[in-house]
Amino acid sequence: MRKLILALAAPLAALLSAPSHAEDWQKRSAERDVTLKDFRFSTGETMDLRLHVTTLGTPRKGPDGRIDNAVMVLHGTGGSGWQFFRPQFADELFGKGQPLDITKYYVILPDNIGHGKSSKPSDGMKMAFPRYAYADMVAAQKRMLAEGLGVDRLELILGTSMGCMHAFVWGTEYPGVARRLAPFACNTMEIAGRNRMWRQMSIDAIKADPLWNGGNYASPPESGLRTARYLSMIAGGNPVALQDQHPTREKAEKYLAGAYAAAVKGSLDANDQIYQLDSSRDYNPEPKLKAVTVPVLWVNSADDFINPPELGLAQRHAKRMKQAKFILLPATRDTKGHSTHTWAKFWKKDLARLLRSKAP
C-alpha cells in the first residue's frame, strides 16, 4: 500500500492516523504472479495478463478434494492486496481466534487489473492498455483463483469500496461461488450522480493538464494530479472528524499542506489513475440482485461522501436479496468517512456472525 494515493480504500487522513502494527503480517504471507494467457477483455482485445496475489494461511481440501477454506478480500480503487496488512484491518481479523484467523482460513488478497503489481498501463502500454472495466476485473479474479490457486469456491468474499462492488458482481454474475458476501462501502446501482461526477472531474483534470500529452508525458502532469488528489481527500474524509481535528483556518490549511505533501511522495501514475477511476463505468448489478441468495453482510457508513446515506439505495436494494443484512454505521468523530470500511473494529462482530451463519 505504499503507492495508495487516489485510493478510495484508504484516504490520506486514515493513513496518517493509522496505529503501528502489532504484527508484521507481510512476513507471514506468500506472494506470486499468476499469468492469464490470452485474457479477453470486454473490448474484444486480448493479452497475457499478470495478476499479482498475496496469500495468508494454508489451503485445506475437503472430502470432495476441493479447497474449502478460501476467503478472498478485494481492495478499493487505487489499492492493492497489501493494504489489508494495515493494523486496523489485519490485527483485528487475522490473528488466532479472530474472524479471519489464518490458522483456519486461506486468505487471498489479489491486486486487481491496473493496480499494485498486476498488469497496468504504466507497465509500458500507457493509454494503449485495454480499457478494462469491472466485468473484466472480476473475470480475471475468477481465472486467477482457478488457474493459479486451484480454488473454485469461496467461504467468503469481503470487498471494500471497489471491492464491495466487485462482491456484488460476483453475487449476480457467478451466484453461489462464494458462500457468503461482505460488501462494505458501496451501492448496487450504476455509478451516476455525484459519484460519477467527482470521478470524471478527476479524470478531466489530469487530461486537461498540457503535460499529460495524451498519456505520453515526460514528467507527471502535476497540475491535473493536484486536483485529482484534492478531490480524493474530500471524497474520502469524515467531515465531523475533519472539523473536530482542524477547527481553525490555520489548522485546516496546515493539515492540507501536510497531507498533500505525503500524497505526492507515493503518487500513482496518472494514466493508471485515469483507468482506475473509469473502470466502474459498466457497474450495475441492480437488475440481477434477486440472484443473490447467499448470506450477505452489507455495511455502509453515514459519513461516506461517495455513497451518501441520503440516497436510501442500500436500504431498498438489500430487501431484494434473500439473506441480506444491511447496516448503516452512524457518523461519529471516530469513524473514518468512506474508509470506515477498512477499520474492522466498526463491523468485526457482525462479520463473525456472518461467518457463523448457515450457507449453501
Image (cartoon, grey):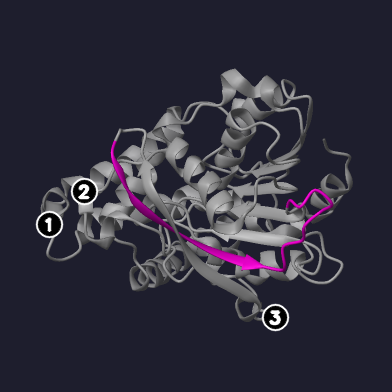
Which residue is painted at 68% across and 23% down in the image?
A: 291
Q: Quadrant of residue 98?
A: bottom right
Task: Write down the residue under mark 2.
Answer: 127
**Badge 1 element:** helix
Residue 315 picture location, percent across and down: 71, 27
Side of 55 where 191 appears, left or right: left
The one of 304 and 286 positioned closer to us in this rendering: 286
Element type where label 2 sits in the image: helix
Which residue is labeled 3 in the image?
23
Q: Is residue 310 above or below residue 216?
A: above
The amino acid type, in three-letter code, at marker 1 is: Leu
Q: Which numbered circle lies on residue 211?
A: 1
* Numbered tag placed on residue 134 in the rendering: none
- For the residues bearing labels 2 and 3, Cβ distance under 8 angstroms: no
Q: Is residue 329 above or below residue 233?
A: above
Q: Which residues are magenta?
A: 45-66
Earlier sequence position, callout 2 versus callout 3: 3
**Mark 2 residue crowding within 10 angstroms, few (<14) / some (14–19) / many (20+):** some
Residue 63 colored in magenta in the image: yes
The answer to whether residue 27 shows anywhere in this view is yes
Gap between marks 2 and 1, in whole Å?
15 Å
Dot 2 or dot 1, earlier in sequence: 2
Residue 144 placed where, x, y %? 52, 52
Q: Amino acid at mark 2?
A: Met
Give how far apart the Cα atoms at labels 1 and 3 are: 42 Å
Q: Is residue 279 magenta?
A: no
Mark 2 → mark 3, Cα distance in angstroms: 39 Å
Q: Residue at x 48, y 63 (%)?
A: 12
